[in-house]
């Protein structure tokens, strides 16, 4: 069960970082 939470946390963090990067560098998208 803890693995599911860890995986969800990693995916959420990665998505958040990706969206933040897309907002900061809009010329690359």
Image (tube, grey):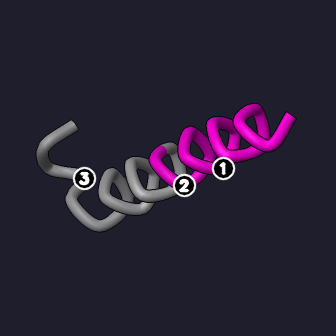
Crowding at mark 3 (Cα within 10 Å: few <14, some 14-19, many 20+)? few
Q: Residue at x 31, y 59 (%)?
A: 21
Label 3 belongs to which residue? 26
Q: Main secondary structure of the magenta part?
A: helix
Q: CA distance from mark 3 to mark 2?
A: 20 Å
Mark 1 or mark 3, earlier in chain: 1
Q: Residue at x 71, y 36 (%)?
A: 3
Label 2 belongs to which residue? 13
Which is nearer the eye, 9 or 24? Answer: 9
- Residue 13 left/right relative to 17: right
Q: Secondary structure at mark 1?
A: helix
Q: Secondary structure at mark 2?
A: helix
Crowding at mark 1 (Cα within 10 Å: few <14, some 14-19, many 20+)? few
Q: Secondary structure at mark 3?
A: helix
Q: Which residues are magenta?
A: 1-14
Label 1 belongs to which residue? 9
Mark 3 or mark 2, earlier in chain: 2
Q: CA distance from mark 1 to mark 3?
A: 25 Å
The C terminus: image quadrant? top left
Q: Which quadrant holds residue 28?
A: top left
Looking at the picture, how far across and down is residue 14, in whole percent?
46, 47
- Is residue 12 found inside the magenta-colored segment of the image? yes
Which is nearer the eye, 27 or 13? Answer: 13
Image: 4 above or below 23: above
Q: Are marks 3 and 2 in contact (CB under 8 Å)?
A: no
- Is residue 20 found inside the magenta-colored segment of the image? no
Q: Are marks 1 and 3 in contact (CB under 8 Å)?
A: no
Q: Residue at x 80, y 43 (%)?
A: 2
Q: CA distance from mark 1 to mark 2?
A: 6 Å
Looking at the picture, how far across and down is residue 25, in whole percent?
21, 59
Looking at the picture, how far across and down is residue 19, in whole percent?
45, 50
Q: Are marks 1 and 2 in contact (CB under 8 Å)?
A: yes
């Amino acid at each position: 069960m803890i693995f599911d939470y860890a995986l969800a946390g990693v995916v959420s963090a990665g998505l958040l970082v990706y969206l933040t990067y897309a907002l900061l560098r809009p010329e690359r998208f």
